[in-house]
Structures are given as C-alpha cells and as structure tokens.
Amino acid sequence: MPAHVVYGDTFLVAEEVRRIKDGLGAGDLMESNRHRVSAAQARPEEVLAMCSSLPFLDVMRLVELEGALATQESSGIGGRSGGRRQRASSGVWAPLAEAVPQFPDTTLLIVVDGEVSQNNPLLRSLAEHASVHRQSTPTGTALNQWIKGRAEAKGSSITPPAIQAMAEMVGGDLWTIDRELEKLSLYAAGRDITDSDVREMVPHAQEANIFAAVDAIVDGQPGLALRLLMQLMNDGHEPLYIIAMIERQLRLLALAKDLTDNHGVAQPELGKRMGTNSDFVVRKTLGQARRMTLQDISRKYRRVLESDLAIKQGRLEPAVSLQLLAADLATER
C-alpha cells in the first residue's frame, strides 16, 4: 500500500488526508489498527515498529505521523545536497524514509505537516518512496474562487463584494473562512450572502486584519499590508493601537519560532506556552513563524519600536508613521 506525504495549509491538508483515507477504505478500521502519532512525542523506532506490523483482523494498518518534516526545518541542512549526504541529513527520522519500501503492503503511512521548505531533507528523502501532496493556501483570485466554491458546497451563494470582504478580513485562514461561511449560510437563509452580512457577522475582524497584514508583511506585499492597516484606521483604531497589535504579533512570532525550532514544542502545546486559547491565533502565528527567521522577526520588531517612539516623541504624524512602517516592514527582506 502506498505511503503518502501531505503538507502545507493545515485545512487543505486535513481534507486531503481524509480523501486519501476514504479512498482506500481506512475510515472503518478497528481502533487497534489506527495510530496517530506526534513526531515530537514519539521515537522513530516506535513508528517503524507500527509500520512493520501486520493489521489485527483487518485489511490494513493506518499510521499518521504528524510534525516529522518540521523537525528538519531549522536544521540548516537541505538545499542542493544529493545522494548520501541528503539521507544523512534527514535527522532522526531518516530510517523511516529508508524503510518505506520494506513496509508490508497492508500498511498505510501518511506523513502530515504544515508548510515546509521544498528543500526539507526529510521531505526529499520520503519523496523517493511516497506520493507527495502539497496543499498550498490559495491567494488572490484563487482564494476568491475557493470562498465561492466553499459557500456553494454549503448550499449558499455569495456576492463578489462579500467574497472580497471575507478575503480581506480573514486573509488565508481557511479554517476561519469555512467556519464563518457555515454561520453566514444559516444567517442568509437562502438569499445571497452580502458584504454587509460578512462585516456584521464575522467576529474578530480586527484581529483577522492584523494577521492578514502581518501575512502581507512576511510575504513582501507592502500595498496589501498598507491597505489592511488603513482599513483598521478607517474603522476607528488609533495608529498607536495598531502598531501595538503588530508589536504583539511579532512577539508571538518570536516565541513560537523559539519554542518550535529550539525546544520541539508541538502545535497542541504551543497555545498554552503562548498564553492563548485561540486555535486561530496559534495556527496563524505558527504559519507565519515558519516563513521567517528569528533574525527577520527581531529586525522587524526593532523597526516597530522605532515607529512607536517617533509618534510618541512627536517626530512623525501617527498616520504617516504607520504608512512608512507598513512599507518598510514589507519591503525589508
């Protein structure tokens, strides 16, 4: 039975994993033949033993391994290495990649992770023996089409302005978009979902805009970052408050980066360490942290403090300072 590697946007990853399992009939397996393992809490030899065991009174054994690829993201290895060096650099999980061809045909291994580098050494090793499914978060027109399709799947229709409002307010957080579309579909009760519905019903729009702005900053999109931050100002929020929100998010990014890269903290534990119960905050922060280095975060954090100080000392008008900050952060690579 083939092995699969599914990584990228966590919402799309979850859907793809479900499709794989349903397509192979893994949904009705006995509990004893289903294993869901966190790489941060398991030893490779334990997972190898699971994968090497025949199923008990069933057609297959399912092993889902979460977070193994992420263990190689901060190792500084990977890149354009090949052959022997690549296998040696795959870390403690290298034996798993090498053992895949020897697993029984009754074993279904699915390696699951968030977004990782294309040069991730473990990903490249596994790709030699497994089917790789990359699930990228849709952006721009693709995101708008995804929102439209998701609404239609729930039996609703949504207007283009409402789609745009949802995309701008929530950004690429597909979990939140899906949840809010569920509520909006019930609220609209058969009529089109409008932008007024979105702005009235979608909570945490302010926080979502901050995350979307930081996404734009991380991805080097100054125009989008500025538009989102200006929207917060138009909604009545003071520039100093907005800057404080950006500063808070950069602090969370630094904490998440340190906890995951240097201490191996898994996503379920991350929220507790960050002091938040919001899955939305954890998912967004973790996704952003994976695309930045600690040096990047520190540099941007210092720039935010400079902007805050310029306002408080009267050297710049608040709105001007915020505009310059958005442009500087998004163009700084």
Image (cartoon, helix red, strand yellow):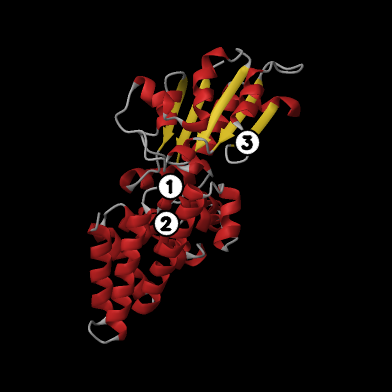
Indicate the amino acid at tag 1. Ile
Residue 196 visible in the picture: no
Q: Earlier in the sequence, mark 3 or mark 1?
A: 3
Secondary structure beneath label 1: helix
Q: Give the residue at x 74% y 29%.
A: 31
Q: Do the numbered discs 1 and 2 sit on residues whose CB atoms are within 8 Å?
A: yes
Q: Which residue is mark 3?
A: 42
Indicate the amino acid at tag 2. Met
Residue 89 drawn above or below residue 167: above
Secondary structure beneath label 2: helix
What is the x, y in percent for residue 309? Answer: 31, 80
What is the x, y in percent for residue 157? Answer: 46, 48
Q: Which mark's residue is nearer the viewer, 3 or 1?
A: 3
Query: For the residues marked 1 and 2, what is the alpha-carbon distance in whole angstroms?
Result: 8 Å
State which quadrant residue 42 falls in: top right
> Left of 59 or right of it: where is 318?
left
Q: Which residue is mark 2?
A: 166
Q: Along the line of sight, which residue is nearer the eye, 151 or 235?
A: 235
Residue 45 drawn above or below residue 258: above
